[in-house]
Amino acid sequence: MERIPILRMGGFLLVTIQVDMHDRLVTTLQDELTTMIAQTGAHGVLIDISSLDMVDSFIGRMIGDIAGMSRVLDAETVVVGMRPAVAITLVELGLSLAGVRTALDVEKGMGLLRAATRRRLAEADDGGVER
Amino acid sequence: MVVSKDEIMEIRASDHVVLVRQAVRKWSTELGFGLVDQTKIITAASELARNTLDYGGGGTVRLEAVESGGRRGLRLIFEDQGPGIVDLEKALTDGYTTGKGMGMGLSGSKRLVNEFDIVSRVGEGTRVTITRWK
Ligand SMILES: Nc1ncnc2c1ncn2[C@@H]1O[C@H](COP(=O)(O)OP(=O)(O)OP(=O)(O)O)[C@@H](O)[C@H]1O
Ligand SMILES: [Mg+2]
C-alpha cells in the first residue's frame, strides 16, 4: 500500500509530503503520526511541503488536523518549504492555517522546534511556572 | 470570445481531481501563464473539482483555451447533475459548509479567478464557470 514515510530526526518527526494526497492516504498518515508521537514522545513535527505545487482547502485541512492532534499529544507542528506562489495563493483563497507555524526549510524548522524545546525545559526547571 | 481548443474530462473519483489539476497545469503553462497565475487557477480547479465529486455526485469539467480582445485565457466549466444548491448566497460565504470542509472552496476560488459564474438548480445540478486571463 502507498504510504507517506515518517522519519525521526533528533527528537522530532519529519513528514515529507510528495504525492497528491487522497483521502485514504491522509487518514493513514494521521493514524501513523499520532501513534509515533505517542511512542517516541516527540515534541515536534515537521511537515515538508516543498514539493507541493498547490495547497487547497483539502490539504489545508489535513495540515490543520495534524497540528491539532499533535498539540493534544504535546507536540508542536511546523510546516516547512512552502513555495512563494503557494503562499500567495493560500492567502487569497482565505486559508489561515491557524496555530501552525511555518519556516523556510527543514533546518530552520528544526531551529524553531529546538528553541521551543529549550523554553519547555526552562519552564520545567522553574517548576512549570511561566515567566 | 473565441475558443481555440477544448477538452472534456470526467470527475468521478478522487484520482480524477488529480488528473484535472495536472491538465490545468499543462494548459496554463501552454498559455504562457506566470507561476502565481498558474497556481491560482490550479487551486481553484482543485476546489471546484472536489465539490463536483463530493456534493454533485460526480460530473465533468470542460477546459477551454479562450481569446478575447487580444487577451488569452483559460476557462473551466464544472458541471454536475447532483442535488443543486438551495441557498447560493450562503454557499458563497466564507466558512459555510454542509459537509466536513472548511467552507472556503467556492468563496476562495472566486477570489482566485477573474470571472466566476455559478448556476444551480435544486434537483437538477450545478454549473460553475471560471476564467483566468493571462
Ligand atoms: N457542486 C455542488 N453541488 C451541490 N452543492 C454544492 C456544490 N458545490 C458546493 N456545494 C455546497 O456549497 C457548500 C460550500 O462549498 P465550499 O466548497 O465553499 O465549501 P466545502 O466544500 O463545504 O468546504 P471546503 O471546500 O473548504 O473543503 C458545500 O458545503 C455544499 O453544501
Ligand atoms: Mg469545497
Image: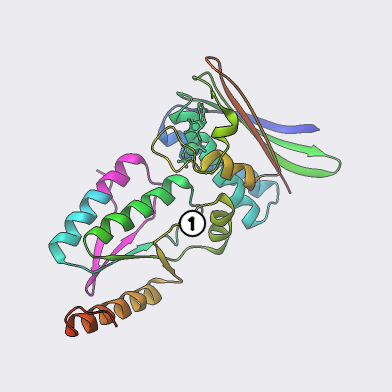
Q: Which residue is at the front of the view, B30 or B102?
A: B102
The residue that disc 1 covers is: A96
Q: In which image quadrant can residue B13 be found? A: top left
Callout 1: few (<14), some (14-19), or many (20+) C-alpha neighbours within 10 Å?
few
Q: Is residue A27 magenta?
A: yes
Q: What is the secondary structure assignment of the residue under circle 1?
A: loop
Q: Which residue is at the front of the view, B128 or B77?
A: B128
Residue B110 in the image, given as x and y percentages of width and height: 63, 42
Residue depicted at 81% across the width and 44% down the height? B71
Q: In which image quadrant can residue A123 be found? A: bottom left
Residue depicted at 43% across the width and 45% down the height? A58
Q: Residue furthest right?
A: B69
Q: Magenta part of the protein: which range?
A: A1-29
Q: Chain of mark 1?
A: A
Q: Does A33 sit left or right of A97 as displayed?
A: left
Q: Give the answer, above or below, for where A105 lies relative to A59.
A: below
Q: Quadrant of the N terminus of chain B?
A: top right
